[in-house]
Image (cartoon, helix red, strand yellow):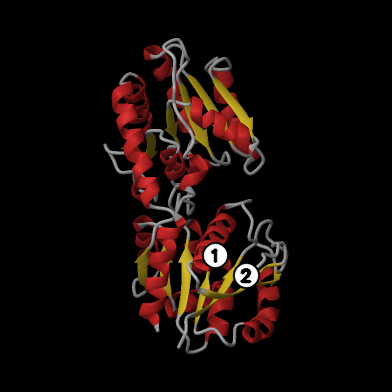
Amino acid sequence: MSLHIGIIAPDLTMKHGWAQHSLSLIKALHKAGVQLTVVAARNSPLFEGIEVHPILPALVPRERGLTLKLLAQIPAVRKLLRDCNLIHVLAEPYAFLGASVAGNRPLLITAHGSYVHIVENERWPFNLLYRRAFLQSTLICVSHYTAKVAQVLLPTIKTIVINNGVDAERFAHIQHLHKPDDKPIVLAVGALKGRKGQLELVQAMPTVLKQVPNAQCILIGSLTNEPDYVRRIQEAIAAQNLGDHVHLLGHVSEETLLDTYSRANLFVLPSMNDGWKFEGYGLVHLEASAAGLPVIGTTDCGAEDAIDNEVTGLLVPQSQVTEKLPEAIIRLLNNPQLAAQMGAAGRLKAQRQTWDTVAGEMIALYNSQR
């Protein structure tokens, strides 16, 4: 029997993590010749050569009454995916829809991070539907930390780890030709959120500036997701008189983003577990590696898979971030040779971890389920 995969996905865009992962994986699977039928969120575009049915309620922003709307879509999705021999759900909130249409067919659910907690956070009785769906599936976790969290929540769950991929070609042309009089740049990319740790980075800068007085810290990413958190960051900048050294750029164009990567000396995103929210993998760390930058992240989250400690960058304990983060930043800013060595190692890591590589791992898993 030929391989025909039924995909249940969010919008196939680059607007958020679920979408970016889904679009990248679907394109790579299609490139590898896998037959796909994709049922996606209604805010998804169509793609030439890929069968996409954009009929599902949107996840970002989350539509009101999402769960009830998914229940209503079961008959239509079941009909669209009737000829598929395996069902793969690419975003956790669609999990029980996948379980409802899979029947006796193998079910795979990709777990990206925080939303594995949907089995306890969703209101009753829908939380029970998600628990049943997760336990019916093989849960594809994007990191070993995500798998560990899932296994604590559901001890009998079946998990497998397949890390995120990266579009290494997007960053391949970036070169770092720093001049001696250039101000060293510490770069962070990602929406300003508590679990991303930008506040801890800003709080580290006064200590960094005592050793590297001309250092600059640039934060790129949405300023609207968690306004109270952004306000705390702005207050920290004002309180420490960091206005000449820390810059919040918000959203920027692709050209500006890639230019900033080329001018940066170091990438830092010290992810911090924030209640039930945690960094599932830390794709931006791998993207920074693809751009040839040394990277700094934290332990006890998915960044442990994205960063090879002391090889492509440094991992600092979340519990000691106040002390250890500035030490790590100073160490790499003051040792350009080590930074360059880690950046080169990171670029090699990224070139091995492309979406084509991930698609190959996924196809092997699909075949093992038949």
Q: Left or right? Give the position of 233 relative to 286.
A: right
Mark closer to the observer (2, 1)? 2
Residue 84 location, quadrant: bottom right
The residue beneath circle 1 is 26
Circle 2 residues within 10 Å: few <14, some 14–19, many ≥20: some
Q: Could you say which is closer to the camera, residue 136 or residue 186? A: 186
Disc 2 marks a residue whose amino acid type is Ile
Circle 1 residues within 10 Å: few <14, some 14–19, many ≥20: many
- Specify which label sits upstream in the sequence, 2 or 1: 1
Taking the spot 45% from the left edge, 88% from the top edge, the residue there is 1
Taking the spot 37% from the left edge, 33% from the top edge, the residue there is 294
Q: Is residue 205 visible?
A: yes
Q: Position of residue 117 (x, y in %)?
A: 48, 62
Numbered circle sitting on residue 43: none
Where is 330 relative to 227, above or below? Answer: above
Q: Left or right? Give the position of 108 relative to 79.
A: left
Q: Position of residue 140 (x, y in %)?
A: 42, 67
Where is 13 relative to 160, above or below? Answer: above
Q: Where is residue 283 in the image (x, y as percent from the top left)?
A: 46, 48
Q: Position of residue 220 (x, y in %)?
A: 58, 34
Q: Left or right? Give the position of 47 relative to 132.
A: right
| Position of the C terminus by quadrant | bottom left
Taking the spot 33% from the left edge, 18% from the top edge, the residue there is 334
**Element under disc 2:** loop
The residue beneath circle 2 is 50
Q: Is residue 320 visible?
A: no
Where is 55 relative to 84, above or below? Answer: above
Taking the spot 41% from the left edge, 39% from the top edge, the residue there is 289
Disc 1 marks a residue whose amino acid type is Ile
Q: Are marks 2 and 1 in contact (CB under 8 Å)?
A: yes
Q: Could you say which is closer to the camera, residue 53 or residue 329? A: 53
**Element under disc 1:** helix
